[in-house]
Image: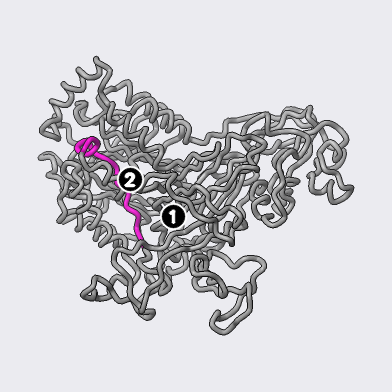
Amino acid sequence: MITNMRADVSKVNKQVKCQKKWGSWRIACCGLAILLGGCGSSEGSRFSEQLEYFTLGASSMVLTAYGASTPTDNNTYVFRCPSVSGLSRDASVSVMHVRANMNLPFFTLNSSLGIRSDSASSVGVSMQELPLGMLDIYKRCQSTSSEQYVTSCPEDYTLVEDCEKTTEENTCQKMWEGTHHLVISSRIIDSDDCFSEAVDRTSYSSSVPNIAYACDSFSQMPVLATYRGTAPISGCCSEETVGPTLDFCVRPCGCRELTVQIVPKDGIVEDLSNVPSQEDKTGKVDSTLRFAVLSNVEGNTTVFRKILEDIKTHDVAFVVSLGNLTKNGRESQFREMRAIVDSVLSPVDGNDCTYTEDAQYCCTSAERQFPFFCNARINRIPFIAGLGESEGGGSGRSTYRELFGVSNMLSVIGKVEFLMIDTSDAGITSAARKWVSNLFDRRDDATCKIPAPDQSAWPSLASCFEQNGAETCHECIGVEAYCVTPNVEQNDVSAGPKNCICIPDTAKYCRYGMQCSEENGEVASCMCTRDDDCGQGGACQDGICHPPLRFVFSYTPLFDEHGLRNSAFLSRENAMALLSQLAHAGTTAIFSGRTLDYSQFSKAGIDFYLTGGGGAEMASYSSHGHHWLLVEVPNAYEAPDDYSVTVMDIE
C-alpha cells in the first residue's frame, strides 16, 4: 500500500537527463570495459574485502554477524570469557569485535568439525553501541568491576534489594528492566552424517550444563552476557572514552548451527499507535515497525540535518541512506556526516553536561541514566549508509568502514528482513549474487514417511533414559534408529544431548527440524511446529513456513523507469538475473536512489521506489523537492503482510 500525505506523485513522461555530469562518459567507458572484462572490478573487490568485516574464522569454525560489523581488523582481539557464561576456563579466545549497525543484530556459529565440533574452543563477541537499556542489567554484588554488570542474575545467585546492604556472596541486584532478551537456539545441520542412532557427541563437563543445553535447545533459551566499560571517576568521563561493550562467548556444537539473537520479551510488543505520551511508551515495543529511507545527500549538511531532525519525530527504528551521502567519498566528508548523525540520532548518556578545561565532562548520578558507565549510547536510532557511484572508489573507503560499517548487509527485525546490496558500480558481481542466494533461508516443500509407533508417538531419548536407562535410540525402541529434532511439545532443553526423538532408520525423516504430519507408514508432508524451524524472521503458521517480509536496498535501480540506462544497471542481463533471484525469494519492495527524483513502479511482483531527494539538486522535472520516505510495517513481530510508504517533503 502506498500513500503520500504531503504531495501527489505524478509520473513524468519526459526524457531523463543525465543525473551526473560524468554519467554518459561512464556508460561509454564501462561499455568498453565490459568488452575487456573489467567493469565492476572495484565492486567485486569491495565485496570480497567486506566478508571479513562480518565473519570471523577461527579453529575450523565461522562466526557470522548480521546487522553488525567490525570497525577494525578481526583476529587481533582476545579476552577471557565472562565467568558468568560458564566458559571461564577459556582464557584467551578469538573475539569478533563489532559495532551494532542495526537494532537487533544476530550471530550464527558453524563448525566444519561435524559431530566432533563440541571439542572446539569458544569464540567471543564484544559488541559496541547496542543501546544500553535494551537488555536487563543486573549488578553482581561481590564481583570484580569487569564482570559486575550482567544481563541476568545467575541461577545460583540470590536477588537482593540493594548490594550496599549485603555482604553475602553470590548475590545480585536488578538495576534496569529491559525490553529484550539475549537468547540462543540451535538446529541440526542438513547432513546425513549428523543423524545416527547413537548420541555420539563429546559431552561437556557438568560445570557448564548451560552450554550443552544450548546445543540441543531447538527453541530459544537465555544467554548470560556481561557489560564491560569504564566507570566515571568523580562523576566525570573523558570524551574519548569508548562506551560499554556487551560481551559473551559461544562454543560450537556437533552437527548444529547456533544462532544468538536479541528478541523482545513476551508481552512487550503492543500497538502504540494511539498512545500519545512518550512516557507511556517506555518499556514497550511498538508492533508497527517504522524506518526512514533517503538518498543522494551529496554533502548538503543543511538539508541533511533538517531531514534527520524531521525523521527523529516519527518514532522510526532506523534510517537508511542508500548512497552518495558525501560529495565524492573523501575521509573528511564521511567524518563530517557521521558527526551530524551522532549529534541528532545517537545521544550519549550524560552528554548534556558541561565540559571542563581538561576535556572532561561532568556526569553526576543525578544527570545520567546509567551512572555506572561512561559514554553509553541511549535511545540510539541506527543509521545505515550505503555507497553511491561517487563513493565506491573514493579515498575515504576505510573511513567509511570505520564510521558506517559495510555496504552489503542483512538484518532482521521481528518478521521483517532487510538486505542492503552494494550496487554503486551500477551492477552486481556473481560472487555477491551467490552471497544473496545463500542468505535466503528457503524451506522447500518436502515429504516424509515414518512407520506408525507402537504407542501414541515415538518416544524421546530422554524419556527412555528416565524409564529404563536407555543411552541410545537403539536401546530405546529396539531397532536401528535415528535421533531427530523434537517437536515443540516434546522439546526439553534440560535433557541436553538426549533432547531428540527416536525413530526407526527405515523412516524418511524431515530436514531442518521440521516434523512429519503423519506417522502411519504413509507418505506425508513435512511441517513446522515453531517459528525457529523456518529460519531467521520466518513464521510458522498452520504447519507451513512463511518467509519474512523482505525489503532490499540497492543504490542503483535495477531498471530506469523512463527507459534510459544511465540511471540504472549498465547490464540488463545483470539486472534481470538479480530481479529473478529477488522475485523468487518473495521480495516485497526494492528501494533505490541515484535518480534525483521520486517515482514508484512494480515489476515481477516487486514494488520499486526510486528516491534521490536527500540534499542534491533535484531534477528539473521532479514533482518533489528534498524529501525522505517513511515506511511503516504493521504487525511486524507476528505476521506482517502489508506496508505503506509516505513521501515526506522537506520545506
Mark identifier at residue 127: 1
Considering the whole magenta stretch, tell me its main secondary structure.
loop
Q: In this view, does 580 lie to the left or right of 36?
A: right
List x then y, in percent, for residue 194: 68, 34
In the image, which is nearer the foreground, mark 2 or mark 1? 1
Judge the density around disc 2: few (<14), some (14-19), many (≥20) Cα neighbours within 10 Å.
few
SS label for mark 2 = loop
Q: In which quarter of the image is the N terminus?
A: top left
List x then y, in percent, for residue 374: 37, 69
Mark found first going from the N terminus, 2 or 1 = 2
Is residue 289 or residue 337 the one in the foreground? 337
Residue 557 visible in the current orientation? yes
Q: In this view, does 499 lie to the left or right of 384?
A: right
- Residue type at mark 2? Ile
Is residue 118 or residue 370 the one in the foreground? 118
- Residue type at mark 1? Met
Mark identifier at residue 2: 2
Judge the density around disc 1: few (<14), some (14-19), many (≥20) Cα neighbours within 10 Å.
many
Residue interval drawn in magenta: 378-394
Which residue lies at the image location 40% right of the left edge and 53% below the top edge?
100
- Does 566 appear above or below 596? above
